[in-house]
Image (spheres, coloured by chain):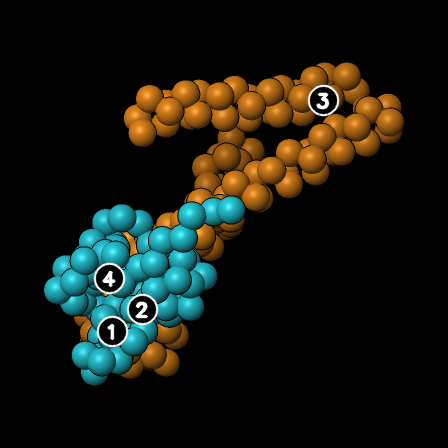
Amino acid sequence: MKNYLEQIRKKRGITQNELAEILKVSRQTISSIEKGRYNPSILLAFKIARYFGQTIEEIFIYEEEK
Amino acid sequence: MKNRKGLYILQTLAGIALTIVGGFVLNSEEMNMVSGLFIGIGSACTALGVGWFIQSLVIPEDRMKQMKKQKAVELVDERSIRVRERTGYMTGKIMDYVFLGFILILGFMGVDKLIIIIATLLLVIKFILVICFSSYYFKEM
């Protein structure tokens, strides 16, 4: 799933490590989400959205499978 | 930290003592099983004690705390959990074929039927467990 996490995180000026610590996940998880290799659970997606004060749709782009 | 090092030394000494008792004191025929148990536990205690002692010497305390914290995060990290689950699933799937091949080889080798039946039973138990857990998780989720 594509997302704007990297851009939003960089705009806030926080590192992957810091975000991982805040969300209580590993740095690799943040990195994988940013690269679109790993789709987070709905719980983690909510945590991320809530932390940045945005909606899930503003961070993650859902594309219907063809 | 000093207390911990002392504990590792104590564990190592206890392990050595258990191994010596198992190997040289309890060496009568009747005590064969107890002796084996003492040697086994003693060896494990010694190896772990020495390992942890060396680890406590090589890795600084703050780095150790950091590593423990990282380990705790990774234990509950959802991606790590998913990786573990997928790894377990793939390993199990491959092992089914490996085990099936093993049973076939046993059959071709002309091994005693009882051994082949026991090996097959292990595979059957595995499939029963798969059905039980699948049914449990289908109801649970």
| Chain letter, colour cyan | A
Secondary element at tag 4: helix
- Closer to the chain start, of discs 4 and 1, is 1
Q: Which residue is mark 2?
A: A4
Which mark, by number, is residue B115? 3
Mark 4 surroundings: few (<14), some (14-19) or many (≥20) residues within 10 A: few
The answer to whether marks 2 and 1 mark residues whose Cβ atoms lie closer than 8 Å is yes
**SS class of the residue under badge 1?**
helix
Query: Closer to the N terminus: mark 4 or mark 2?
Result: 2
Q: Chain letter for mark 1, please.
A: A
B58 sits left or right of B113 in the view = left
**Circle 4 or circle 1, nearest the eye:** 4
Task: Tell me the crowding category of disc 2: few under 14, some 14 to 19, or many 20 or more residues within 10 angstroms, Cα based.
Answer: some
Q: Quadrant of the C terminus of chain B?
A: top left
Q: CA distance from mark 4 to mark 3?
A: 61 Å
Q: CA distance from mark 2 to mark 3?
A: 59 Å
CA distance for labels 4 and 1: 10 Å
What residue is pinned by disc 1? A8
Instruction: Identify the residue at image location x=18%, y=58%.
Output: A55
Measure the C-alpha gap from mark 4 to mark 2.
8 Å
